[in-house]
Image (cartoon, grey):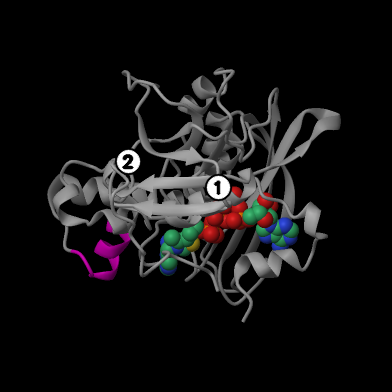
Amino acid sequence: MLDELQIIDLFFEKSEVPVDDCAYLPETSQIITGDSMVENTHFRLDWHPPELLARKLFQSNLSDVAAGGGDPQWCLLQMGLPGNAEEQFLKRFAAAFREECKENRCKLIGGDTFRNTTYIFSLTMAGRVRRPLQRRAHPGDAIYMTGTAGLSLAGMKHLTGEMKLTGSLQKRALERHLAPVARLDLARKLREMPDLHGMMDLSDGLLQDLERFARAAGQRFHLHLHSIPCDDELLPLMPALERAISGEEYELVFCAPAGLQQAPGFDITQIGRVITGPPGLTVFEDSSEGKIVIPESRGFEHF
Ligand SMILES: Nc1ncnc2c1ncn2[C@@H]1O[C@H](COP(=O)(O)OP(=O)(O)O)[C@@H](O)[C@H]1O
Ligand SMILES: Cc1ncc(C[n+]2csc(CCOP(=O)(O)OP(=O)(O)O)c2C)c(N)n1
Ligand SMILES: [Mg+2]
């Protein structure tokens, strides 16, 4: 079986394969993206109340628009629904989705609805952009991420029974997994920095996403595992390599000159650096770069 990127490659000439979170439409200064929530692939009905499902669908797309340097403008909603879909489920989903559109000034302008054996929710979102942010980096840049990594995987592991979380940590992990919030607030600040070279959002985990970022940028990325920021309470419960494969965090990862400082409302951490070398990712234990780590797992992959 081909993997996800090999399948996508089938549709493009080699030089035209899309590598960014969003496609850029220069004629109208817009960016456009699409992401889906599919039953038993992205969510389970017994885990995910319809309100949170609608919000996660919206926020995962908003996260791409934020990483692309844009502000949301309009969206199209495609839905596959079982014949026995409950009216209450659909009403609750629709009400929450409408709230998201309103809160984020994003107009639902169309879509498609069809019968399917399971639920499929797929969103296309467009945004306006002044300077589209792509997956670019310069040698010598620092690699930064916003927020923390690990909570989403911890939340899912709690739901599957692989981890037993309690109290406020359980709440934060479930919230991160079931109801992530795109970092549009920080993206708006970051995109004003003239020497921000490139940005993406964290959906498949740092190992996969940084590998793709590095290849798109044509640079070598060094990730420092022990620099990956983590929720204080989760830190002793989740090894660094697991934080590096936690997807669906919807934090931002970006490359800019070293020396950026954390500040209130600006929760960024340096997690690695960019060097000249063959495009790809090398994982080191820490920032001394004394010990290379070969990960056993790359995290969640569709194929
Ligand atoms: N079926 C497809 N046809 C054309 N382009 C695709 C398809 N699936 C994914 N892509 C593109 O391939 C790139 C990688 O996809 P993906 O990993 O889903 O991006 P993201 O993590 O930003 O959602 C994106 O630019 C996306 O638009
Ligand atoms: C039932 C269920 N199984 C597995 C997962 C974990 N999971 C599903 S998709 C995904 C990665 C992100 O989804 P993807 O469709 O690859 O988003 P994109 O990279 O396109 O933004 C993860 C970690 C989940 N959330 N729910
Ligand atoms: Mg996608």
Q: 174 or 118: which is nearer to us?
A: 174
Could you tell me which residue is drawn at 33 percent across and 57 percent down?
153
In the displayed structure image, the side of residue 17 where residue 236 appears, left or right:
left
Query: Where is 303 relative to 208, above or below?
Result: below
Tell me which segment is drawn in magenta: 154-163
Q: 194 or 82: which is nearer to us?
A: 194
In the displayed structure image, the side of residue 169 where residue 273 appears, left or right:
right
Of the 4 image quadrants, the one containing the N terminus is bottom right
Q: Position of residue 136 (x, y in %)?
A: 61, 37
Q: Secondary structure at mark 2?
A: loop
**Membership of 215 in magenta stretch:** no
Of the 4 image quadrants, the one containing the C terminus is bottom right
Residue at the disc numbered 2: 148
**Amino acid at pointer 2:** Thr
Q: Earlier in the sequence, mark 1 or mark 2?
A: 2
**Amino acid at pointer 1:** Gly
Q: Position of residue 287 (x, y in %)?
A: 30, 41
Which label belongs to residue 277? Answer: 1
* Disc nearest the viewer among 1 and 2: 1
Q: Secondary structure at mark 1?
A: loop
Query: Where is 96 relative to 269, above or below?
Result: below
In the displayed structure image, the side of residue 228 where residue 298 appears, left or right:
right
Q: Position of residue 262 (x, y in %)?
A: 33, 22
* Neighbours of disc 1 within 10 Å: few (<14), some (14-19), many (20+): few
Query: Where is 149 relative to 146, above or below?
Result: below
